[in-house]
Amino acid sequence: MKKIIALFVLSISYFGFSQGNTHTQAGGKFEGLAMTPPMGWNSWNTFATNIDEKLVKETADIMVSSGMAAAGYNYIVLDDGWMTKERNANGDLVPDPVKFPSGMKALVEYVHSKGLKFGLYNCAGTQTCAGYPGTRGYEYQDARFYAKLEIDFLKYDWCNTKGITAVEAYTTMSNALKTAGRPIVFSLCEWGDNQPWEWGKPVGNLWRISGDIYPCFDCEFKHPENWSSWGFMKIAEMRKDIRKYSGPDHWNDFDMMEVGNEMNDTEDKAHFSIWCMMASPLVAGNDFRKMSKETLAILTNKELIAVNQDKLGIQGFKHSAEDGLEVWVKPLADGSWAVTFLNRSEVPKKINFDWKKNPIKDTDFGYEADFSKTVFKLKDLWKNKEAGTTKKNFVSDLASHDVITLRLTP
């Protein structure tokens, strides 16, 4: 009898008589799916909800034939607008049969047949941002639906979420994906409003740190509905002191790229350089079918991509800024550094950079470069040629909004 009482008391102390909370589910994201920043294409920036089967197939074909897949771009992600406005009688999401007459499963298989991966979009709220069925209350059902389709990536937005908390909503969906059993990269898109970098590491593989990007260098575009989109430099500097939270399999996501959308080639080059320096996911947002050779060359610069995909996985930071001329730096796994000179101003600038007077100190991760003690070789990653060493000042002209990115090798 004493033994029975002891066991009963033990059960009280362990379960606390909580109402049904006697089972702890193993949750959390699938680990190891994004050890370097994900690379791919997303439909939203150019097409919004005007998406269909033909667009996806053509984009997948060009991703392979253009050399983008070989450069590392492997995700095709359909954003908002892929489903019908209502769920079916069983509560399932329904891919739009007009936009996708062959069915979503067949489309996923087509993308996979090209050696690529496939992603879809939904939202933590009752509706998506464009007014399609959201996932609130359907998390486990939708996760099973995605697993059955065999998708590889889920972008999860934050519209129409009144009354719920971000931590709870994203954790629930993360657990649902894990329970469904198919490894799916989980992309948190709640715009940085709830500081996802502080809690997102066990939940998702990447998280947005800002509102939507806009195809301009440094502007704010105010929408009539009282919200703003941001130029890429605004986003690059929007959050302070968050780089320490980013790394392999848990990335700060600076949003999809606008390379090839409305800016000039110089600004596109700067945009791409900064995204590579910041270890941001590289997700193209342009129309591949109309892509210029200049845009393709920017997006497939293997030297810059190597900086972005560096296994150390450390986000770069702004080292200095003077009179519109900025220097951004990023430590790399082999002891090298990436250094980007950026002309933030509207007029040309002359660079005359004395390495010995500008040692680098990364206070977040403990990396340092003292150029008075160690000589580094310089390689210009946009020109793909050697550029001297740190024994001499680096001297160059730099046009407005242009960049020079160097790799410094000891």
Image (tube, rainbow, N blue to C red):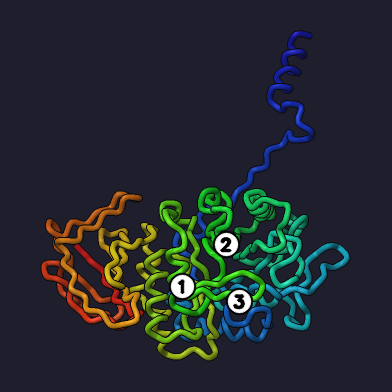
Residue receiving disc 3 = 44
Q: Position of residue 216 (x, y in %)?
A: 47, 79
User: Dot 3 lies on which element?
Assistant: helix
Q: Earlier in the sequence, mark 2 or mark 3?
A: 3
Q: Which mark is residue 191?
A: 2
Is residue 156 shown above or below 344? above
Q: Closest to the observer: 100 or 44?
A: 44
Q: Which mark is residue 232?
A: 1
Q: Confirm or deny contact between disc 2 and disc 1 (CB under 8 A).
A: no
Is residue 28 shown above or below 108? above
For the residue marked with disc 3, what is the amino acid? Trp
- The residue mark sitting in front, 2 or 3, is 2
Is residue 317 shown above or below 55? above
Neighbour class for label 1 at 10 Å: few (<14), some, many (≥20)? many
Is residue 156 shown above or below 301? above
For the residue marked with disc 1, what is the amino acid? Phe
Q: Position of residue 191 (x, y in %)?
A: 57, 62
User: Dot 1 lies on which element?
Assistant: helix
Neighbour class for label 2 at 10 Å: few (<14), some, many (≥20)? some
The number of discs equals 3
Q: Confirm or deny contact between disc 2 and disc 3 (CB under 8 A).
A: no
For the residue marked with disc 2, what is the amino acid? Trp
**Residue lying furthest right:** 89
User: Dot 2 lies on which element?
Assistant: loop
Label 2, label 3: how far apart the Cα atoms are: 15 Å
